[in-house]
Amino acid sequence: MTATETASNTRWKIIALVFMIYVLMFIDRVNISIAAKFIMPEYGLTDLQFGWIFSAFVLGYALAQIPGGWLGDRYGPRRVMTWAIVWWSVFTAATALAGEFILASTFGVVGSFMIVRILIGLGEAAAPPNGNRIVANWVAPQERAFALGIVISGAQLGGALTPPLIVWIMLTWGWREAFYFSGALGIIVAAVWFYLGTDTPEEHPKVNAAELLHISQGQPARAAQAGAFRELPWRRLFGSRDLILLTMAYVVLGYISYFYFAWFYLYLVDERGFSVTDGGFYTMAPFLAGAAAGPLGGWLSDRLCLRYGKRIGRCGLSGCSMLLTGVLLFFGATTANPILAVALLSLSIGVLYLSVSSYWAVTIDLTRTYAGTASGFMNMGGNLGGTVSPSLTPYLAQNYNWETSITVMSGLCVVGALCWLFLHPEREIDFSE
C-alpha cells in the first residue's frame, strides 16, 4: 500500500447487497398480510385463524435463529445466505397453492397455510444473523451501527413497497400471482448475492490494502477470530446478563413490530374505515418512517459512542426511543381522527427504529467472534415476542377493542426501556477461560 492510496469502498457495496436481501425478506414476510383480505373470504377464515397463520411463520422464524446464526459463523454467510434465500423463495411461491395442497386434506386449510409459513420462516431465519455476521466481518467498529441502520432500513423499505405492489398485483392478476412474483424475485436475488458477495473482505478482489486496514482497525486479528469458533462456549455466551437483557428488550420490539407486519393494513381497513387501496397506501407510512430512521439512528449511535461511550450511544438512545415510542402508540390508539392515528402510529415505529441498529451492534460489541450466533439468540427472542403478537392482537381487539391492543404495546415499552437501563455494552463477554 502506498502512502497516497485511497481506500476502496467495496464494503458499502456489500452492505447494499445485504440491504437488497432485507428488502426481499420483508416483501415475502408482509405480502400475506395484504393477501389476507382475499384469502380469508375465499376459504372462510376468521381473524383469529389467520392470526395463527401469521404466528406460524414467526414461530418457525424464531426457532431457527440460533441455528441460522451458528451456520453463518461456522461455514460463512455467503453460502448460508444463498441457500436460505432459495429455500424461503420456493415456499413463498408455494403459498399460492397452500389451500389446495394435499396438506390441506390432511391438516385443513389453516394447517396447510401454517406449515408453509413455518417453512418460509425457517429459511428467513438465517438472514438477519448472517447479515449481522457480514457487518461484523466487513465494517469497522466506528461505522458499524450506521451500516446496520442501512441494512435494517431495507426491511422497512420492503415493508413499505409491499402493500401497494401486492395490492396492484392482486387487483390486476390475482393474489396467487403475487406469491409467484415474490418467489421468482427471490431466486434472482440469491443468484446476485452468490455471484457478488464474499464472506470476508480479504476474499474480495475489489478490496484494496487501504480499505482492509480501515476495516480491521480496532478489531482482533481475523485469523484468531476464525480459530476461536472451533469450540463455541454456549454456556458463557448465553449466560451473559447483558445478552439476556438485550434479548428481553428485543422481545418488546418484536411484539410491537409484528403488529405492523401482520395487522396494520387490516386495522386501517376494518377499524379505521379506509378503502382497500387507501389502506394499502397508508400502510406504507410506518415502514417508510422506519426506513428513514434506521440509518439516522445508526449514524447517531456511532457519533454518540465516539463522544460519550457505548452506555450513552447504545443504551441511552435505545431506552429513550423506547419510552417515546410508548407515548406515540398510546396517543395513536386513542385519537378519533384516522389520519392523525396513521401519523402517530407511523411516527412511533420510526422512533422505535432509531434504536434498532443499536441492538444488532451490541451483539457484536459483546461477542465479536460469535456475532452471528448471539444475534440469532437475540432475534429469536424478538420473534418469540412476534409469535405472540399476531394472535394476541386480534384476541384483545375481539374481546376488548383495538385501542386496548395497542395500549398494551405502549405499556410494554416501559419494560423495554428498563432493560436498556441495566445493560452495559462495554462488558464484552470473556471467552478466554
Image (tube, rainbow, N blue to C red):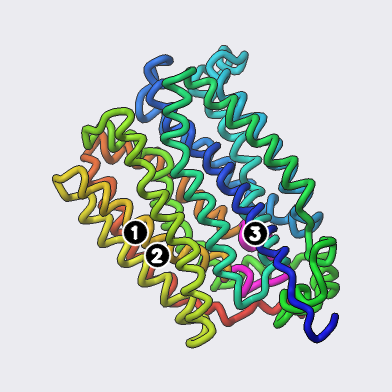
Residue 413 place in picture, x, y as percent: 34, 62
Q: Quadrant of the C terminus?
A: bottom right
Q: Say which residue label 2 marks.
A: 416
The residue most toward the front is 4
| Residue plotted at (62% across, 30% down) | 183
Residue 7 place in picture, x, y as percent: 74, 74
Q: Amino acid at mark 3?
A: Ile
Residues at badges 1 and 2 in contact (C-beta under 8 Å)? yes
Which numbered disc flags the more N-terminal residue, 3 or 2?
Answer: 3
| Residue plotted at (36% across, 72% down) | 320
Q: Nearer the viewer, mark 3 or mark 2?
A: 3
Q: Nearer the viewer, residue 290 or 3?
A: 3
Q: Which residues are magenta?
A: 362-376
Report the disc number at residue 15. Answer: 3
Q: In the displayed structure, does residue 386 sit left or right of residue 417? A: right
Q: Is residue 67 visible?
A: yes
Q: Quadrant of the N terminus?
A: bottom right
Q: Say which residue label 1 marks.
A: 412
Q: Nearer the viewer, mark 3 or mark 1?
A: 3
Q: Amino acid at mark 2?
A: Gly
Q: In the displayed structure, does residue 190 sit left or right of residue 167? A: right
Q: Amino acid at mark 1?
A: Leu
Q: Secondary structure at mark 1?
A: helix
Q: Mark 1 to mark 2: distance in Å?
A: 7 Å
Residues at badges 3 and 2 in contact (C-beta under 8 Å)? no
**In which image quadrant can residue 88 be found?**
top right
| Residue plotted at (64% across, 49% down) | 127
Q: Nearer the viewer, residue 396 or 133?
A: 133
